[in-house]
Amino acid sequence: MRARTGSRAGPGTGSRTGGPRTRSRTGGPGNDSRTGGPRTGPRPRPWGRAGQYLALLGYLVFLAFPFLWLISTAFKPARELGSLHPTWIPRHPTLDNFRQAFDEQPLLRAGLNSLLAAVSAALIAVVVAIPMAYVMARRRGRLATAATGWVVVSQAFPFVLLIIPLFLVLKNLHLINSVAGLVLVYVVWSLPFALWMLVGYVRAVPLELEEAAAVDGAGRLRTLVSVTAPLLAPGIVATGLFAFITAWNEFFFALVLLKTPEKQTLPVVLTHFLGAEGAADLGPLAAAAFLATLPSLAVFAVIQRRITSGMLAGAVKS
């Protein structure tokens, strides 16, 4: 007898091959939609998500504790500061610490010096870093590799090894005890990290945009200014914020390079609240330190929305 193969499918078999029926597009319940097999991905566990949020909450408390205690100390009177049972909320809040801080030290002038140095260093570092980062991202070769290695290695140098050469260089340039010399040091110190940040942003810009600009007759400089730089807005803002905060909070270079009290920055002036034997005037010191942290918080609160990714979404049609 002639055997019939595939002419009639039995129950539970395919119509052509006679094999068991399988779903070609979608799997059954609990199966993967592409392969039809069982799903192997891990299922989210509620206790794992709760642990993550608990760890994040603990980290936020760890970061916020010094600042909250600083605010509490700034508004406490002298009697509560010496109490053996301190409290979070001052029982009798007062502004005397702020008045005493402004009476004892030139905080306003020191704040203006810090603001001038920080803003100038941030602007110069960003302006210098943009073309350098563009070259490092677009040009591949030994020079770009060496520059990247210099960026990484320079971050490992401690302040103590750099202060003597910097002091000698600034002395020959007659920039000792000047805000301009301090700005120059801040630019040199923040430039490697600024380059490292901006190189990644430049590499994220599609080359098709620059090629289209080149077809329209734009040169390298015009392409950088008109096409690439506007797309680097998140990176530019983040880099400028980093350079500003670094210069605003810096203490060691300002202590060594600035000798005249009229030119000292705010972190250096804060040390004047310490006595000759190391005794600190906690009330005025806390008040001045609280005021010194406000500019950094204000700058970050204003521009934090700009520090986002995704500005390149939809820039090039696929």
Image: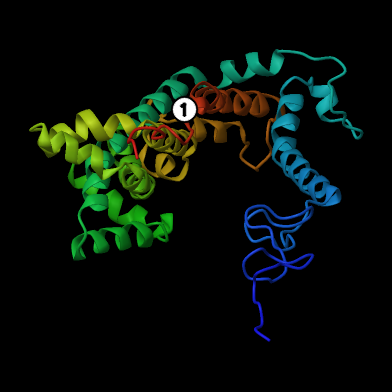
- The residue identified by callout 1 is 306
Colour scheme of the picture: rainbow
Quadrant location of the C terminus in the rendered image: top left
**Residue 212: where, in percent of width, then height?**
18, 36
Residue drawn at the location 23% of the way across and 59% of the way down: 144
Question: Foreground: 56 or 104?
Answer: 56
Residue drawn at the location 69% of the way across and 62% of the way down: 22
**Residue 162: where, in percent of width, then height?**
35, 56
Quadrant location of the N terminus in the rendered image: bottom right
Question: Foreground: 266 or 3?
Answer: 3
Decide if residue 211 is on the left or right side of residue 268: left
**Residue 146: where, in percent of width, then height?**
25, 63
- Image vertical order of residue 37 relative to residue 58, above or below: below
Q: Secondary structure under badge 1?
A: helix
Question: Foreground: 162 or 227?
Answer: 227
Does the rendering let one see residue 275? yes
Where on the picture, by quarter, is residue 103? top right
List the single residue furthest toward the left: 217
List the single residue furthest toward the bottom: 1
User: Residue flagged by tag 1: what amino acid is it?
Assistant: Arg
Where on the picture, by quarter, is residue 74? top right
How many numbered discs? 1
Residue drawn at the location 19% of the way across and 61% of the way down: 143
Disc 1: CA contacts within 10 A as few (<14), some (14-19) or many (>=20): some
- Image vertical order of residue 203 relative to residue 117, above or below: below
- Image vertical order of residue 100 relative to residue 165, above or below: above
Decide if residue 282 is on the left or right side of residue 92: left
Where on the picture, by quarter, is residue 158? bottom left
Question: Foreground: 238 or 200?
Answer: 200
**Residue 2: where, in percent of width, then height?**
65, 84
Residue drawn at the location 27% of the way across and 39% of the way down: 130
